[in-house]
Image: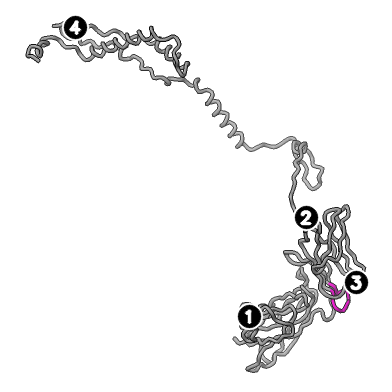
Amino acid sequence: MSMDKRFSNMGKVKRTTEEIVEDAIVKQDRIVAMWHKNKPTTPAVSNPKQTEDEMKINTKQKPLQAAAPVAAEGSAPETKKAPAESKKSPVIVLGRGRGLKEYWFPILCAVCVIALFVWALIPSGGNDNKVVSDDPALPAETIDSTDSAEPTIRIIDEAVYPSFDVVRIEKDGNLMLAGRYLPGTPVSVVMNKKIVATSTTDNNGEFVYAPKKKMAPGNYTIRLSAADRGIYSENNVFVHIPSSKDYSRALSLLMTKDGSKVLQAPTLADGDLVVSKIDYLENGRIVVTGKSVPRLRVSLTLNGKYLGFSRTSDHRNFMLGANVDKLNAGEQYKLDIKLHDTSGTVVAAVSHKFEMPKMTDGDETYYTVRRGDALWIISRNFIGRGSLFTIIVESNNIKNPDLIYPQQKLKIPVKK
């Protein structure tokens, strides 16, 4: 570039920045006006409502004033600012400027949800639509009339089992058994794991079994069975008939999960509670053996001090061992043995007075096995712990601890 061109504008007044900006705005307004004039009549838009709003805004917009003319060469630049309207021209942003009327539906939905939530939290008041119940088991004015109009039927899926009502031995020795189950359903009487009779319940679901043959002495376990359904009674009945054939001394017990219940209490006689043997051991324990009514409890008291209880086996044997204070040789002692029914009431008692003999060194204790005994029970009574039965096994060279025989004599090591 030559020196003349570089300095050709010297002495001329240059255009200010504001003049350049205002000139550009005027050109932009002209272009917008030409676009509105020549725009297509049916524009393809995704939101016609929004385009219509834009048209309204654009038509209402005031055109910007033209910029001031450029100052002549050689004249001083104007210091006059651009009109205020050109600076305050609105800037339009699509999607903004909507009022609350545009969101009336979401607001209405939110108000409804809040109202329902508040209504659910408010506790319901008293109900005036009440009627008096005809059921005497219910208090008056507790049945809602709306509930009584449409009663709810509840179906409970529970198994029904045959049950006992009466089991006793009559004076002539015959068995009287009564029970209940579903109406018109056959029920079998199972005695000692054998079915002895089958009877059908009546319309009330009741049945009776009364054989004419007398019951022989012994022990019987009776249960009921619904043969066509494979269902057995939940509880069993234990019946004991003494060998003397005195049927007034027969015992009938209902055996449940929670214990036993007396259905027929025996009339006790001499021999129903007998003490067979009293052993005082070197380890400070006393062991009492005897005979009593099957499955009833026998308690032991020595000189007024309660020592514990034992349950009589089905074979009428009981054995009870307990720790006692030192018994002095030559002194008198009183031993009380009481028989209790299933409710704990004392039905018989035996007192036994004895003089403590002098113990000699080297004496050995022997026990004769009875029916229903087990090494664990023998060890618990004589040694104090059932788990120490291995000591008895080693002392007697027993090959099979689960197999001992009645009348078998066992040597009991009882040293401390």
Q: Nearer the viewer, mark 1 or mark 4?
A: 1
- Mark 1 or mark 4, earlier in chain: 4
Q: Is residue 262 visible?
A: no
Circle 2 residues within 10 Å: few <14, some 14–19, many ≥20 = few
> Identity of the amino acid at label 1?
Phe
Q: Residue at x 18, y 9 (%)?
A: 77
Q: Answer whether residue 245 is magenta in the image.
A: yes
Determine whether 372 is above or below 137 in the image. below
Determine whether 362 is above or below 143 in the image. below
> Identity of the amino acid at label 2?
Val
- Give the residue pinned by disc 1: 389
- Give the residue pinned by disc 2: 160
Residue 37: image location, x then y, percent: 38, 7
Residue 169: image location, x then y, percent: 87, 69
Residue 33: image location, x then y, percent: 35, 8
Residue 340: image location, x then y, percent: 77, 73
Closer to the camera in the image, 235 or 397: 397
Q: Main secondary structure of the magenta part?
A: loop
Figure quadrant of the N terminus: top left
Task: Give the magenta-colored segment's residue range.
Answer: 241-250
Determine whether 337 is above or below 164 in the image. below
Q: What distance separates the C-alpha of mark 2 from that of mark 3?
A: 32 Å
Circle 3 residues within 10 Å: few <14, some 14–19, many ≥20 = few
Secondary element at image label 4: loop
Q: Residue at x 85, y 66 (%)?
A: 196
- Give the residue pinned by disc 3: 214
> Identity of the amino acid at label 4?
Ala
Q: What distance separates the C-alpha of mark 1 from that of mark 2?
A: 44 Å
- Give the residue pinned by disc 4: 71
